[in-house]
Image: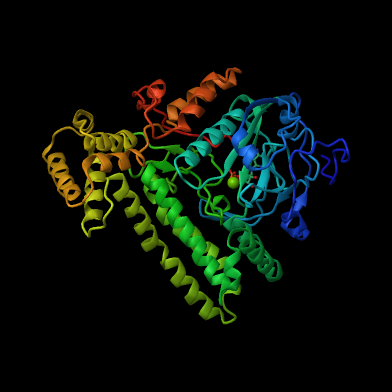
Amino acid sequence: MDLSPSKQPRGEDQPRLFSFDNSYARLPEPFYKRCDPTPVQAPKLIEFNGPLADQLGLNREDGSDELLARVFSGNQLMAGSEPIATAYSGHQFGTFNPTLGDGRAILLGEVIDLDNHRRDIQLKGSGRTPYSRGGDGRAPIGPVLREYILSEAMHALGVPTTRALAAVASGERVIRDFPEPGAVLTRVAKAHIRVGTFQYFAARGDQGNLHRLADYAISRTDPLLMAEEEPYLAFLKKVIDRQAGLIAKWMNLGFIHGVINTDNMAISGETLDYGPCAFLDFYQPDKAFSAVDVGSRYAFGNQPMIGQWNLARFAEAILPLLDEDQDAAVDKATQAVRGFLPLYEDYWLAGMRAKLGLSLAEPDDKDLAERLLAIMADNRSDFTSAFRALANHQAGKTAAAQAEFGTSDAVAAWFSDWQERLDRESEPAQDQAARMFAVNPRVIPRNHRVEKAIREARDDDYTEFHRLLAAVREPYGEQPDTREYETPPSEQEEVLRTFCGT
Ligand code: AMP
Ligand code: MG
């Protein structure tokens, strides 16, 4: 295998699609290794995110589909790109692995978008890197399309997330459980800096680069914090706050990440590394989909606790930066990490209030929300449909809620308490309903529909993928032509397991 820095010709003939400015590549070598993408046999553009490309300032004057397929498969480098694979460690299912790194991803470079924000442009599935270990550096089409659909859905649902810019079929086969067509995903992030990136330098006792990474990360995500008296402690608290807000959003929507290893937790607070992730169909707090998560470590209801566990690992990694006196550093870190759960609870409850149409805060609201979830768990209610039915109920269409919840005593009591609670707000019911429709989605990327789109794409038919993608981009409004995506799976259709497909 040739991993020399420059496998591909660089020069005047490279297309100028982006104005790259590659700050990560200006950090010293231990942060990454230079590594070009390995060309694929027959790149064909499956999907391209035009609005995102425009936001990133992509020059599309002569951007034919063929050119886009070439550059977003890694077959042709763009002018100004400096491909690198970044180094990181990570706790995988609780076990520390000191050397992970981008084994199937290559950072092409960074661009400044129209809002003046720096964005990483990264290929996933673009061939082996020095961190590939036994892997092939490739991605099957299944995980590429799953990440495309799920991440664009999350964005439309208002959840911080990496974005998908392009999906390109490689024209090659990738062997996993069975041979599958290969593909390359182009992913855009505020920054691909992970908790595991900090662990990489901490594990090596490399305090100089730990410091450098912290300064760099702060400059990427929180530049104002540098003016604080204790910038690294302020940074720790900020990362904790963002994760609390992020995981609360997942829990409000019924999203299971599936593999929240510390290398898959971004300090930017974006949902990162969509593997065997899925939305709940029926509500089951201990639901885990991932085939590799045998102990259900990353089950739905565990996500907040795991978030805090990962953040404790982050705090440990940056201890040397928090205080010269390590006992004092431990105290500061402990206090900050303990702050996670109360923050999470606040975000989660604010989200639940909105879902229930409440704009004021009352002390019993948490109890009201938890009683509802207990009823939903007992009934095996479809998570998404149940909340949408509540919005319909508040809009005067009560049949949906009756069908969804039934008429047990517990349900009747809950509805009566909820209505009393709503009556204590000053807004008219129609306004409450309108706000509920705006936070309780009608369409989510349901697992069985994602699987259907992937199955058909494996046979080179992308119709269902395109339709589903369009549907999940409009999750809240009433679109008659996407009604089929609202329907929960039948027992036969229900997807019980999801796979990383790595
Ligand atoms: P992930 O499942 O994305 O969290 O990946 C965990 C680690 O395995 C990372 O270091 C990846 O780069 C690496 N990895 C996953 N799939 C592959 C692959 N097909 N080839 C090489 N490395 C891989
Ligand atoms: Mg990962």
Name the residue at 51% across, 29% down.
469
Q: As rendered, which of 481 and 297 lies closer to the eye?
A: 481
Q: Is residue 479 above or below residue 19?
A: above
Residue 144 seen from this side: yes
Q: Is residue 401 left or right of residue 82?
A: left
Q: As rendered, which of 203 and 471 lies closer to the eye?
A: 471
Q: Is residue 108 above or below residue 304?
A: above
Residue 104 seen from this side: no
Residue 430: which quarter of the image? top left
Residue 288, given in percent of the width and then of the height, sits at 41, 41
Name the residue at 69% across, 66% down.
212
Residue 398, given in percent of the width and then of the height, sits at 19, 31
Name the residue at 60% across, 56% down.
196
Tell me which image quadrant ligand 1 sits in: top right
Residue 462, given in percent of the width and then of the height, sits at 57, 20
Q: Is residue 422 above or below residue 230?
A: above
Q: Residue furthest bottom?
A: 325
Quadrant of the rendering where the N terminus is positioned: top right
Residue 308, given in percent of the width and then of the height, sits at 45, 59
Q: As rendered, which of 389 and 322 lies closer to the eye?
A: 389
